[in-house]
Image (cartoon, grey):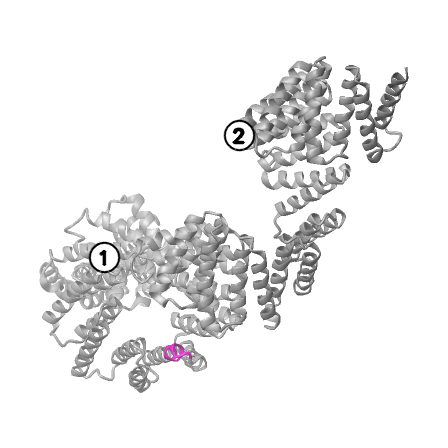
Amino acid sequence: AMPLLEEALRIQKAKMGLKDACVAHTLLRMAEVNVFKKKFDASLVALEQVLFISSSFDENQAIDISLCHYLLGITYIAKENHEKAVASLLLSLEMRKVQFGPNSVECAAVQDKLGKAYGKLREFDKALESLVEALRIRKIELGNDSIDYAHSVFNLSEVHIAMEKYSQAFNCLNEAIRVFDMFPDEAGSLLLDAVVMKGDSLFQLKDYPASVAVFQEAVEMFSHFSQSYGESVATLYYKLGLACSKMNAYEEAFASFRQCIRVFSEDLGPDHLRVGDVMYDVGKLVYSHGEHGSAEKSMECFKEVMRIYSLNKHQNHVRAADVSVQMATIHTDLGEYDEARDALKKALKIYEGGIGEKTSLVGKGLTLQQIGRIHYAKNEFDQALTSFKDALQIFQDTLGEKDMNVSLALSNIGIVHARKSEHEKAVEMCTKALKIRKLHFDDDQDIADSLFNIANILDDWGRKDEALILFEKALKLYKSLPGDLEISQANCQQRIGSIYWSKGNVDDALIAYLDAHEICEAEHEDIEELLTSVHKGLGNCYFLQEEYDSSLNHFAKCLKLQREEIGEKSMDVSSTYDCIGRLYTNQGKYAEAIDFHTKSLHIIEKHHGKGSKESASCNMLIAKALFKMEKYDLCLELLQDSLKVMCTAGDDCIEDVADIHHEIGLVQKRLEKYEEAATSLKTALGIRMKVHGKYDIVVANTLLDFGKVLEEWKDPEEAISVYDQAITVFQKIPESNCLTIAETYVRIGELFEEKENYDSSLFSMKKALKIYSKNCGSETVIVAKTLHKLGRIYDRLDETEKAKACFSEAVKIFRSNLGNDDILVSNSLKCLGTVYSRSNQFAKSVELCTEALRIQKNYEREKPENIADSLTNIGNILNNWNKKEQSLQFYEEALRVYEESDSADASDVANCQQTIGILQKGLGDFETALTCFGKALRGHRSAEGDKSLSVATDLYYMGMLYDSFGEAEKALQCFHECLKIRRKELEEDHLDVLAAKRFIANLERKMMY
């Protein structure tokens, strides 16, 4: 086209002169061709001539000035004069809106280029507005399969990349590639550019596997183009190598870097600076790979880089200083601090030689950061702070307050403050660092890492709730990010588990630890320290859940890792020994528990010496195992020795002193030394109230144990008072266990019941029921147990209907939770049946008690005396129902069961024989009745002595039977002995005393005649 246009222009100028519309048209067409051929100098000359010619015409001349300004805009963009590009394109747009309408494809073309120009000027809002408008028009007018539509989407992706909005860029590039694929001839190079940019976006999004796949696709696409793309291919290999290194695919990364170096060497020469730049990244990759000898190999790479820079007269260039900083990093990690300082001095000299240059100032700041790290590694925290603060000042002055290097420096300062236990300052610095990072990235690993670090500081500071929120945010972010971040997730889960554990939330702690464990099990390298913490956390959780086999399994794995990593004699190993010891104590394996605590004690004594407070704490654990073994004297001796140590250890151990007094009190309680036990627990209580105040959980627990001592000491009034105090304390503490309060109400209720103060007992049991119903649910077993106790109290108060309601509801709940045949169902059925008998509903009573007995026989074969008790209960109901013969059958069966049992109470046997005697007498079988009373008398004398009222009753009935046999002397002898016992035990006007006296008087009268 161009030769023809040039010839046309020559003729037109010759015939018509320069200022002619036809000349302008031809120049416009020539400019259009030059723009297409990317000859922008030529297009600029032609377009300026068009504007010059058009200025001499009136508005009626048909020169397409809008096209002229459009082509000028494209030309200025290519020549990077973006302000002029915007001016020309805005003029073109106004003209085309009039000429073609605002929604025309012609306007869309201008909007597309205008958006590109605004993007280059970093006026992103305007850029997006223009590009989105172009996209809208082209989609409507041309459809979303047109190449113009794809151009707009592609240009939109470039703006998103410039704005560092890589997710949006990625979506746009996918759409552009879809359409470009449909036009391979027209969009070949653009398609390749779009694929490479897609890989770049994925890389920035840290989706490194996807980035690698896209870059590999781009490499394959380059193979279809001419060799003029050699340098571009090398750059692509470089990007591929970086992406592979990010996903720890080291072999693939090295292969890509080798290809990159090969192509650069072939195109530019083996000693070209581009080769040196790639070698620099290879050196960093070798060192990060961490294989044996990686430090030496990395050093060789950096030395080769320095050789290339020297050859190119770049030995004092900023990149050479960067290499020195990397070499210093290796020296620092190897503990070669002098060599590291030498390398950093060299870097500083280079950077300071370029003072005033931004790159040199930044390099100096980075070098100071590295110097700070050396000080930090040597625990020289004040010097580290100075270096980090100097670096921060440089970054703020050079790069502004919101640069990422500023964020990094603030973070390092915060970490040093944390190591110095200056937590408030540490959190302040790290939070400022995080705010800067959030300006640069929406969601990114650095932000997650920052959240994790701040959470760690807060956790160490004791601000657990705030730490937990940040750990959970970090975890959520790690999970949302692409790439291999499982270990970071596991670290988060471990710390979350630790916090939940410290707050007593075992269920959530266990979930977090299990999630961490699942990740650790899938990993195999450099996780020993994390895995040790996870195993210990799981061991502790399972311990509290009484899943002792699982707990022991994890503690054993923790111990194995500790022995391998830190040796047999470390205090961490001692701690794990104690955990296993506690576990064995709870399993009832007390000898094993003492063995592990003793191993722990040996380590503690090696580190802290005998007689130290640490050894005393361990001895307390041994004492607790001895307590469980019922070796109370040994336990008491060990506790008293520990008490002497702790009493001299200072205020730091005051709670330990209270704990020992508490434990001593529990031992004395078991030794039935109630007065001493009460004194010990009062001492513990006094200390704890002084240290923690009246309203603390340890105070409440001490009151509970004090109350139990008083309860066993048969001082129910004082026990009730102490239990009331415990409840008051528990109720003042928000985190108190409501169920403990309910259990204490139950204890109070039972004490009142023993005192026959049934109204007060009822009040306490109702309180307990309300708490259980609210916190456990109204259909739970604990509610049913409380209802059972309430029913028993209502029965004592003769409130039969309420007793029935309680026992009936208890039966219903027990059955729904435990099935129809549980022993608790049996107990409540028996009580319910007994209540029915009191209201003379004997048939229902026998039905319920017989069902209770059926269940009981399945459960309590090893406790036959309990079955015998139930048989006598049914026998008693039948007797009251006046079914003597059936009653007798149950009593005789009960007697048989009693006599076959080795553990039956002699009084129960004698009572049963007595009742059989009464029934036989009522049925007229006096001989059998007399035999039964004789056996009952022997049993009662043996079990209760000669003076018991049961003996008197046996004698009374025997006297009646002897009288009926006409054996007056024997009868009189029985009645006299009966009266003697009753007079001693009962008042003179008691009916039983009067009955015995009446029989004696009658017999004496008979014997006179």
Residue type at mark 1? Val
Q: Position of residue 825 (x, y in %)?
A: 58, 29
Q: Depth check: 132 or 256 in front?
A: 256
Q: Depth check: 305 or 588 in front?
A: 588
Total marks placed: 2
| Residue holding disc 2 | 861
Query: Does 376 appear in magenta?
Result: yes
Give the class, few, some or many, for how many residues have Cα within 10 Å of label 1's Cα (few <14, many ≥20): many
Quarter holding the C terminus? top right
Q: Residue at x 17, y 63 (%)?
A: 256
Gap in angstroms between the C-alphas marked 1 and 2: 73 Å
163 relative to 575 in the view: left or right: left
Q: Is residue 688 above or below residue 365?
A: above
Q: Secondary structure at mark 2?
A: loop
**Taken as a whole, is the magenta stretch helix, strand or loop?**
helix
Magenta highlight range? 372-379
| Residue holding disc 1 | 212
Query: Does 963 appear in magenta?
Result: no
940 relative to 71 in the view: left or right: right
Q: Position of residue 198 (x, y in %)?
A: 26, 56
Disc 1 versus disc 2: nearer the observer:
2
Q: Is residue 876 above or below residue 904?
A: above
Quarter holding the N terminus? bottom left
Residue type at mark 2? Arg
Mark number for residue 656?
Answer: none
Q: Quadrant of residue 444?
A: bottom left
